[in-house]
Amino acid sequence: MMIYDAAGQSPRAFNGATWDVVTDRVMGGISSATLDLVTIAGRSALRLLGEVRLENRGGFVQCALDLAGPGASCDASGYTGLELTVLGNGETYGLHLRTTANRQPWESWRQSFPTTGAWQTLRLPFAGFLPHRCAGTLDLAHLRRVGLVAIGRPFHADVALASLAFYRGPEA
């Protein structure tokens, strides 16, 4: 099931939600980022550009999308994971998931992936998402938000997302 396809030339997902930029400035950090709809290497994509800095307990930039309306959730229990088509600058990025059980902003389920400087389609199985400062198991019946994240060390973030979808079947 397609969540987002930049070929539609819009920052809006299929559910009508818009991608948002979130940085560590919400907690006093000084990282910065922009999010633009661009054509890069022949494909339409959302491009997250930013500087991840660690000062003031900072260290992240992200673009995030609500998977359902306010207070609602998305049931992904019939799927194996998330498939994304990305182009990055050779850095490692993360995909973070939040459920309705995640109350604090630092709680999420995380999986990282490397980028190569070329377009690649990756499958990230839900079984590979690890809890970060949250307990229990990943509740796929109540997914609330997904984030494409540059985090944890000072670096120049440059990652483009052409599509994001739930998938069924094999991991690769």
Image (cartoon, rainbow, N blue to C red):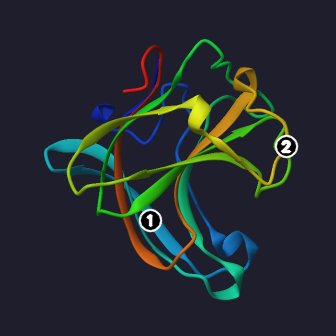
Q: Position of residue 21 (x, y in %)?
A: 55, 58
Front position in the image: 56 or 33: 56
Which mark is in front, 1 or 2?
2
Q: Which residue is mark 1?
A: 34
Question: Which kind of residue does numbered mark 1 sit on?
Answer: Thr
Q: Which residue is mark 2?
A: 135
Residue at (43, 76) in percent of width and height: 155
Callout 1 touching callout 2 (CB < 8 Å): no
Q: Position of residue 70 (x, y in %)?
A: 76, 34
In the drawing, does residue 79 fall left or right of residue 42? right
Q: Is residue 98 above or below residue 126?
A: below
The answer to whether residue 73 is visible is: no
Q: Is residue 38 above or below residue 128?
A: below
Q: Residue furthest left?
A: 42
In the drawing, does residue 164 fall left or right of residue 97? left
The local secondary structure at tag 1 comes to: strand
Q: Is residue 52 above or below residue 4?
A: below
Q: Position of residue 148 (x, y in %)?
A: 51, 50
The local secondary structure at tag 2 comes to: loop
